[in-house]
Every structure is written in structure tokens, then in C-alpha cells.
Image: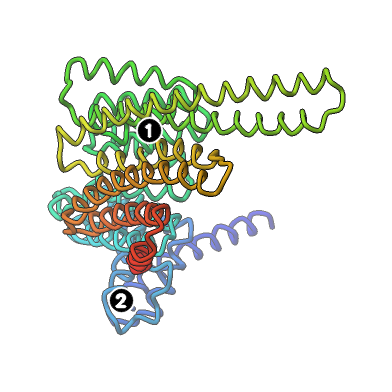
Amino acid sequence: MRKLVLILAATATLQTAYAQRSNVESAAVYLRNLEMVDAKKAIDEAATHDDTKDDPKMWYYRTAIYDTILRNKAYSALVDNNTVEQFVLAAKGCVTSDTKKRYDWYCGSQAIIQAAFDAYNAGWTALQAKDYTKTIKFFEYVTATIPLDKDGQLKKNNLTERAIYDAIYRSAYVDQKYDIARTYSKKLIDMDYQSPIVYYINAETYLINGDTAKGLEVVELGRNRFPTDKDLINYELNIYLNQGKQSILLSKINEALTNNPDNATLNYVRGNIYDKYASECLSNARKAADEAEKADKKAKAEKVPANKTKFQNQAKNLRTKSDSLYKAMLTNANLAETNYKKTVELNPDNMDGYYALGALLNNYENVLLVNKMNAVTGATQAEYDKKYEVLRKQQLELLNKSLKYFNDALAIVETMPESDENLKAEKKRNTILIYESLKSLYANMNDEAKFMETKKKLDELE
């Protein structure tokens, strides 16, 4: 009886295997007769069964069936969100399983190429829809098919690993899949990819995970590859600023300028470092002034003479500190101005240099004038007005100087090319940046007509 059971079990297994092989043959017949509903059903069943899932013949017919469905509008009802993916996987499965090259004429020479393009198009569509998970998935399918392109047809059509790696790491970074972004940006770095941003993104994936040392190592690698790229230099500067070690980068820039004093980018970056020093001094000066004011209030409210004296001394020390910081701010702002002026002298088309000069005057010297204007006192209104008007005149002269620099920057931006979407976007960003600054400037100048005109231009851009 036991022997009979074993025979029956073996027979059942053979029948199941035969049924699956029959499914492959049935799928072939259905395909020849263009009965695609039945063809798809039969091949889908064969693709999931252990007896046929690794069969090159099954993969060949699965590729052909999905290929037919995708290329013929008559079968559009059979197309769903998974159809392209199934075709790509089928083509890949056909090539990799077909060790005897029986189906190479189709799978290796045609289908795998079509699969790569289908995957790329699906990835690009997902990217436009900001579905970064799907973008990464389909672009990774492309990279998996490229090595299978024995005739290099994909490369001839500009579908290369570099282009796909670039799309993957950017998409992964936006989607906060930092491990994937790091992997593919590193592949590009190893391929000596001609783009500074790949170093920035790779470094950022380390910094996000708290590995500042590794991040700086990547930035340094990028700086050696692109020594005058201002974005990488500024990124390195910001890292050192966050660590309180900006003097390290300043030392590097000074050393570089010793050997190359007429480098506009390096002069701009040194100006930017002093600019950030000035901003830090301004922030701390304001904090000290606020704390001094609080100490003054405590002193006025205090009844105990010893405590009153203590708060008065605190206020005095804090005001001294604030004054010292304002002076340091002005010193650094002057150093930044010298470097920015050198930048535009060396490169008259440097929009960043002109914009920085305009912002510099508005951000620092104007602050000191506003402080003085707020501190004006007078025994009479006429005396007050006389003192105030002197300062107001100085302020308007300063703001007009700033205005000229912003307009110089705007004139350069207006000549920027718009030959592709990236250039158009860059031009628009710079235009908005300058208009925002001009709008603020006109408000400080009480020029309502110019303010409204600039606001209208901004509204049209946004």
C-alpha cells in the first residue's frame, strides 16, 4: 500500500510539472494566435511555478507576450502599473538564463534594449511625478540591463551608467534614502564624474548621519578635484562654521590666494568668510544689547542698593561688549567689501560679487545708522529733527549705493542664457533673489512707487 502511495505521489508531481510545461506551450500557441488574455494568464502561471520559473523558454515567451501587449494598442486593457516592470524582468531573465543562446537573437539583441528604454521612461515619468521610490526602482532596472547590452546600443543612444547613476543618487537624496544616494554618488566619484554637486551630496549623506569627519574628507576630495568651485568652498566653510573652526578654511583660502591672488572665486569666498564673521558679530552684539537692556530694567526695579549696583555693572559690561562686537562687525564687513570689490574687478560679470556688495552695505553699515537714528534725542522737536535728518541723509546715500550694486547684479542676470530648463530655473532664482532685496531696499527708502513696481514683478515671477 505504501509503495502505491509513493507511486501516486510521484505521478502527481510529474503531472504538475507537465501541466506547467504545458502552460508554456499553451502560452506560445495563444501568442501565435494573438489570444493575449489567455497567453498572459498561461505564462504568468508558468512564471511562478518551481518547475518552469527558471526555464529559458518560459522567459522567452514571457518576454514576447509582455512585449506584444505593451507595443499594441489593441491590448491596452491588459496593461497595468506592473506591466512594464514584468517585461523588464522577463527580458533580463531571458538573457541571463539562456546560457545556450537559443533566444539571443531576440532577447539579447532586441528585447533587453527595449526593456532598458521602457524602464528609463518609466523612471523618468515617476521622477516628474516626484515618486522617487518608483524612480529609483526603474532606474536601477536600467543599470541592471546595461551590462547585458552586448552590442553597446544603449550607449550609442546616450543611455549610460553615469547618466542613470546621476538620476538615482539625486532622486534617492530627495527621497531621504541616504544610503542609496551615498552608494550611487560614490560610484560617480570613482568614475571621475565631472560634477561638483556629486561630492556635495555624498558628503551630505555622511553629515546627516553625524559623520562630520567623513563628510569633510569627501568635501576635501571634491575641492581638490574642483579647487575654485564656490559652492563646494562655501559648503566646507559652513561645516567649519558649525564647528566653530572657520579659521581653518580662511587659512586655506589665504594660502591659495598667495599662489593665485587674481582668482575671482577665491577672493569672493574670502569675502564670504569675512561676511559670515560680520554676521556672527552682529548677532552676538544684538544679544548683548538685549541683555544689557534687561539688566537696566532689573537695576531700575531693584530696591537693594548692592543688587542695583550689580545689575548696573552688568548692563555697563554688556553695552561695552555690544559696542566691541559692533566694531568687530564693521571691521569684518570692510574686509568682506574689499574682497568683493576685488572679485568684480577681476570678473565684471560676477553677479554674486555685485549682489554681495549690495547686501553687505544694507546688512551692516545700515544697521549702525539705524541704531544711531533710534538713539537720537533732542530737547525740542526741531533739535531732534536736525540730528535725525543728518543720519537719514547718510542712510539714503548708503542705500542708493547698495541699490546700484543690486541693479548691477540684476543687469548681469538679465543676460543669463535660458537654453534649457536648468538655466531657466537658475535665472529665475537669481532674479527673485535680487527683486526681494530691491523690494526691501525701496521700503527702507520710503519709495512706495518703486516698492509696488518691484512687488508686481515678483508676483509675476512667483
Which disc is residue 235 wearing? 1
* Residue 147 visible (yes or no): no
Up the image or down, 281 lies above or below 379; here it is above
Q: Position of residue 148 (x, y in %)?
A: 24, 48
- Quadrant of the image for the N terminus? bottom right
* Residue 35, percent from left and from top: 34, 82
| Residue 225 place in picture, x, y as percent | 23, 27
Q: Is residue 72 above or below residue 304?
A: below
The picture quadrant where one finds residue 353 is top left
Identify residue type, mark 2.
Leu
Tell me which label, 2 or 1, sits earlier in the chain.
Answer: 2
Q: Considering the numbered disc 2 on the image, is that residue within a helix, a strand or a loop?
A: helix
- Closer to the camera, 395 or 256? 395
In the rendered image, residue 265, in percent from the top left (x then y), is placed at: 22, 31
Q: Tell me if label 2 and label 1 are in contact, CB under 8 Å.
A: no
Q: For the residue carrying disc 2, how many other residues have a C-alpha within 10 Å: few (<14), some (14-19), or many (20+)?
A: many
Residue 31, labelled with which disc? 2
At x 55%, y 57%, the residue is 10
Q: Give the SS element for disc 1.
A: helix
Q: Amino acid at mark 1?
A: Tyr
Which one is in front in this view, the residue at disc 2 or the one at disc 1?
Answer: 1
Residue beneath the point at 39% across and 53% down = 445
The alpha-carbon separation of the residues under discs 2 and 1 comes to: 58 Å
